[in-house]
Image: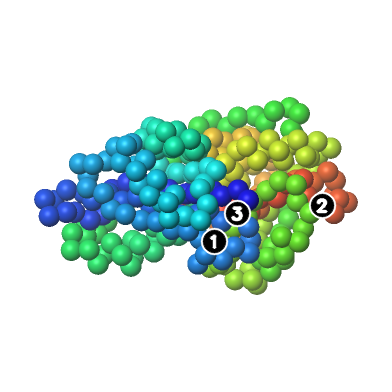
Amino acid sequence: MTTIWEIDFYSRPILDEQGKKIWEILVCESPTKIDTSVDSLFRYAEYCPSGEVNSVRLKGFLEKAIAHAAQSPSKIRFFRQAMNNMINKACSDLGIPAQLSRRTYALNHWLEQRSTEVYPQHPGFQPGANPTVSFTETPPQPLPDALRGQKWAFVTLDASALNEMNEWAIDFGEAFPLSLVGLNFEARVPGVVIFSSRAVPMAAWMLGLELAFLKMDDGPPSRLLLETGVSDRWNLASLSNAGLQAEARNFEMAKQQSQGVHFLAIQTSPEAETFAGFWLLREAKLA
C-alpha cells in the first residue's frame, strides 16, 4: 500500500522569548480513499527555533516522524514554493521523492485547526502574522496531442454516490474523505468527464501529475483549465460557444456551493461502466 505524506516546515504566528519567530514541522498522512478515517491519519508536530532552520534539522525531524509512523512514506507533498530547496534536499538525503502540490488537503485542514485552537494559546501569539499563501500563475500549456479527449461533458453527482467510490472499477485515481471538508451527503458535487479511445494512457499520464483542480478561464479565449502542482496549468477543453461558457459558469457556481469539491473522470465512452481515471479535487485557499 502506497503511503503519501504532506509536510509543512515554516514559521508560525508565535514569537519566542527573544522575539524571534518560532518555526514548526507538521507531518501528516495524505488520505487517498473516500472512506479514510481522518482520525486514523498519522500526524507528527514539533516546534523549531528559527536559528536551527536548515535541511539537516528538517531531515532529523522527518527521521523522527518515520520512527513514530507505522509505515514510511513513498512520496512527500508540500505546498510552499519558498521551501522548495530545503525540503527537496532533506527528502533527497532520505531517498524520498518530494513534490510541490496543492493536494495537501489533510495538512491544510490541520493548519486551520492549529491556527484557531493551538497557536492562539501560545504566550507569544501574533494575530494575523501569517497571510494566506498565493501562487504565481503560469501560461496554460496544451495537452499532448495523443491525450486529448474526443468528447467531454459537465456532470454532477450526489456526495452520497461518491462515498461508494471504493466499489467502482477505477484504473487510476485518488480521493479524500468528504468529512475532511465538512461536506454533507446531500450536497451536489460538480465534475467533468472526458471520453477518449486513449482513456487509459490519458489517465496514466495524469497520475504522474499532482492534480489540483479544474477552473474556467474566461480568456479570451474561454477555456477549461486543469491546474497541477502549485503553478502548472493545462488547456483541458475549449469553451468555444456561449452554451459551453454558460455551463462552465454554472460549474464554477456549483463548486462554490460544494466548498470547492469537484471531480475529474476519464472513460472510453459515455456507455462505459468503468473509469480509466477518477480524481476527487478541491479548489481552496492554503493557509
Quarter of the figure with residue 251: bottom right
Residue at image position (44%, 44%) is: 79
Q: Is residue 259 above or below residue 71?
A: below
Q: Amino acid at mark 2?
A: Thr
Q: Tag 3, which secondary structure?
A: loop
**Mark before the other along the chain sequence, 1 or 2:** 1
Quote the CA–CA distance across marks 3 and 1: 19 Å
Q: Residue furthest front?
A: 67
Quote the CA–CA distance across marks 1 and 2: 27 Å
Q: Residue 114 location, x and y as percent?
A: 35, 62
Residue at image position (64%, 71%) is: 185
Identify the disc placed on residue 259: 1
**Mark before the other along the chain sequence, 3 or 2:** 3
Identify the disc placed on residue 32: 3
Q: Amino acid at mark 3?
A: Thr
Q: Tag 1, which secondary structure?
A: loop
Identify the disc placed on residue 274: 2
